Amino acid sequence: MRSTSLRAAGAFVAGSLVAVSAFAASVNPGAGGMVPTGKGMAVHSEQAPSVVDSVVFRATGIQYHGGPAMIGTNHVYYIWYGNWSGNSAPTILDALASSLGGSSYWNIETTYYQIVGGVQTFVSNSITRNGDVFDSYSQGHSLSDTGVRNAVSHAISSLGLPLDGSGVYLVLTSSDVNETSGFCTQYCGWHTHASISGKDIKYGFIGNPDRCPSACEFIVGNAPNGNAGADGMASIISHELDEAVSDPDLNAWYFSTGAENADQCAWTFGTTFTCNGATANITLGSRCFLIQRNWKNTASGAGCTMHDP
């Protein structure tokens, strides 16, 4: 997903391209600490984040900061934004979301938990695709971060998606749509949360690598499912779901650098194989995908992996 020139200019993190010097140039080394933004670019907080149950994390590297995780069955909602006429991406990426639950890949997420009222509850290996809607440019061809939020709100209020506190709503854009805060130059996707109709709703932006293949495809043109844009989006989707479930409000699981679990393993894929003449590293359902690894949060075997156990 990187071109030679981008390798020279910066480093990819979490589906994002961030300058190598981004942390060092802007961070006050004094009081406070690094916190995530959901875009793979950490920011400095004047108040040091609290660390909960820290004995566990000296072994695994990642730290729990006390916020919620998404417990129980989680629901994926796709908002197909722009023009998807004749494109096979919905078929391919619906299959991805429908196959993650119960997989050894998604089992990595079960190594994360929340502590509420002294009770520790782990993430479950249960995530389902619960709905798709198509949005024909309700917010225009150029989306700001607010425009992405508005697209989610529009999908709920006007296009029929339910208001679901257990959902992750992903705005997937066609290649003629830009995200003006840094798509293709600083990130390929991101996740965050906001209050929508009185609920804390988790959502994200998934950019189409067809707009900038050298920035958002690990191998330009790689297409185990016959659609390079959709195949590139598969890894971005996996990345953002990994983080949205373990760190939905950006205050639960992240490293001292501000990197979330998938940030730590961004653009690493482990062992690969050939599928339909292309490079892949996992089979989910009847399809092959090339999706990035995730951070396994166990004292034994902590690190980037494609499966648990």
Image (tube, rainbow, N blue to C red):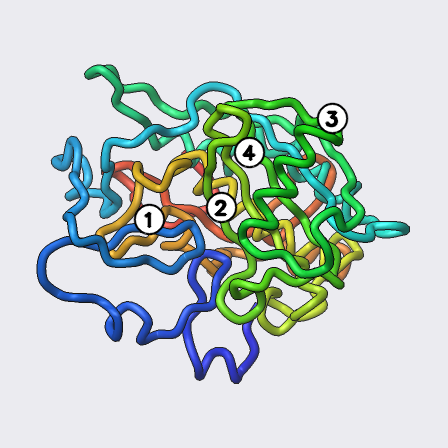
* Residue 70 horizontal side relative to residue 180, left or right: left
Question: What x and y, as percent, mark residue 155?
Answer: 69, 34
The earlier-in-sequence mark between 1 and 4 is: 4
How far apart in space, not on screen, are marks 2 and 3 (Cα)?
22 Å
Mark 3 against mark 4, which lies toward the viewer?
Answer: 3
Q: Report if residue 114 is visible in the image.
A: yes
Q: Nearer the viewer, residue 2 or 160?
A: 160
Where residue 168 is drawn, which disc sits there? 4
Q: Is residue 271 left or right of residue 253?
A: right
Residue drawn at 76 percent across, 50 percent down: 137
Instruction: Tell me which amino acid carries mark 4.
Output: Val
State if disc 2 and disc 1 touch (CB < 8 Å).
no
Q: Which mark is residue 189?
A: none
Looking at the picture, how far across and down is residue 231, in whole percent? Answer: 69, 54
Q: Residue at x 50, y 51 (%)?
A: 190
Q: Which kind of residue does numbered mark 1 sit on?
A: Gly
Residue at the (35%, 32%) spot, across then down: 111
Q: Secondary structure at mark 4?
A: strand
From mark 1 to mark 4, how far is it between C-alphas?
25 Å
Q: Which residue is mark 2?
A: 191
Label disc, if present, on residue 160 of the rendered structure = 3
